[in-house]
Amino acid sequence: MDLLQEEAHTHGDLSLKKVFALLGEEGHAMLILFLCLPYIFPIPVPGLSTISG
């Protein structure tokens, strides 16, 4: 996470490509965690079912 904070502070923006380049194999686990977050809430998030099918 320190690498990501330093990169964002230095360049001002982060793309997924940069995140994967900085984190390597750990980037895939982070992406999976990020994509699963909306589904762990006990109540439905409005509009999410339309996007995710």
Image (tube, rainbow, N blue to C red):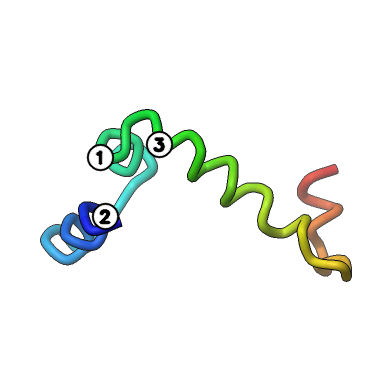
**Mark 2 vs mark 1: which is more N-terminal?**
2
Image location (x, y in percent) of residue 44: 87, 66
Q: Which residue is mark 2?
A: 4
Q: Mark 3 and mark 2 in contact (Cβ < 8 Å)? A: no
Describe residue 30's horizontal placement relative to residue 12 as left or right: right
> 16 or 30: which is nearer to us?
30
**Residue 32, placed above or below residue 37:** above
Q: Mark 1 and mark 2 in contact (Cβ < 8 Å)? A: yes
Quarter of image, res 18: top left
Q: Mark 1 and mark 3 in contact (Cβ < 8 Å)? A: no
The label on residue 26 is: 3
Element carrying mark 3: helix
Q: Which residue is mark 1?
A: 22
Quadrant that contains the C terminus: top right
Q: Residues within 10 Å of mark 2 (few under 14, many from 20)?
A: some
Which residue appears at 40% of the width and 36% of the height? 26
**Residue 26, placed above or below residue 7:** above
Describe residue 49's horizontal placement relative to residue 14 as left or right: right
Q: Amino acid at mark 1?
A: Leu
Distance from disc 2 to disc 1, alpha carbons, whole Å, reads: 7 Å
The label on residue 43 is: none
Image location (x, y in percent) of residue 47: 81, 63
Describe residue 14's horizontal placement relative to residue 38 as left or right: left
